[in-house]
Image (cartoon, rainbow, N blue to C red):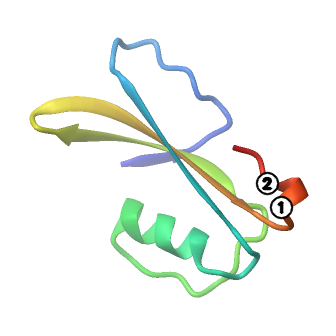
């Protein structure tokens, strides 16, 4: 499952991986993130972006994947 949240801290001792999607408005970033998190495709645009969390297993090790979706002019993008 995934969580859209402003809260980036986790009380568990799970290593974090951070992934950022940056790009122009309406370039498909939010749809790509939604597809990865849920397995379904959405056609609606989401101009506000978002922050998402998902626990993943890599080589049997759990990680907390923190995904940040940002769009807009370069001066508004945050890494």
Instruction: Report crowding for label 2: few under 14, some 14 to 19, many 20 or more residues within 10 A (C-alpha).
Output: some
24 to the left or right of 55: right
For image coordinates 69% across by 43% down, the residue present is 79
Residue at the spot of label 2: 77
For image coordinates 58% across by 71% down, the residue present is 29
For image coordinates 83% across by 61% down, the residue present is 74
How far, Cα to Cα, is label 1 from label 2?
A: 5 Å
| 41 in relation to 53, above or below | below
Residue 13: quadrant of the picture = top left
Residue pushed farthest front?
74
Instruction: Report crowding for label 1: few under 14, some 14 to 19, many 20 or more residues within 10 A (C-alpha).
Output: few
| Residue closer to the observer: 38 or 47 | 47
Relative image position of residue 46 (x, y in whole percent)? 71, 72
Relative image position of residue 1 (x, y in whole percent)? 36, 48
Relative image position of residue 45 (x, y in whole percent)? 69, 80
Residue 43: quadrant of the picture = bottom right
| 34 in relation to 68, above or below | below
Q: Secondary structure at mark 1?
A: helix
| Residue closer to the observer: 75 or 14 | 75
| 18 in relation to 15, above or below | below
* In contact (CB < 8 Å): disc 1 and disc 2: yes
Relative image position of residue 5 (x, y in whole percent)? 62, 40
67 to the left or right of 56: right
| 13 in relation to 29, above or below | above
Q: Secondary structure at mark 2?
A: loop
For image coordinates 87% across by 55% down, the residue present is 76
| Residue closer to the observer: 63 or 20 | 20
Residue at the spot of label 1: 74
């Amino acid at each position: 499952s995934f969580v859209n949240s402003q809260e980036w801290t986790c009380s568990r001792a799970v290593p974090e991986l951070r992934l950022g999607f940056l790009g122009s408005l309406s370039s498909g970033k939010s749809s790509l993130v939604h597809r990865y998190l849920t397995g379904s495709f959405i056609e609606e645009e989401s101009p506000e972006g978002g922050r998402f969390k998902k626990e993943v297993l890599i080589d049997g090790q759990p990680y907390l994947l923190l995904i940040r979706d940002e769009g807009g002019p370069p001066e508004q993008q945050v890494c």
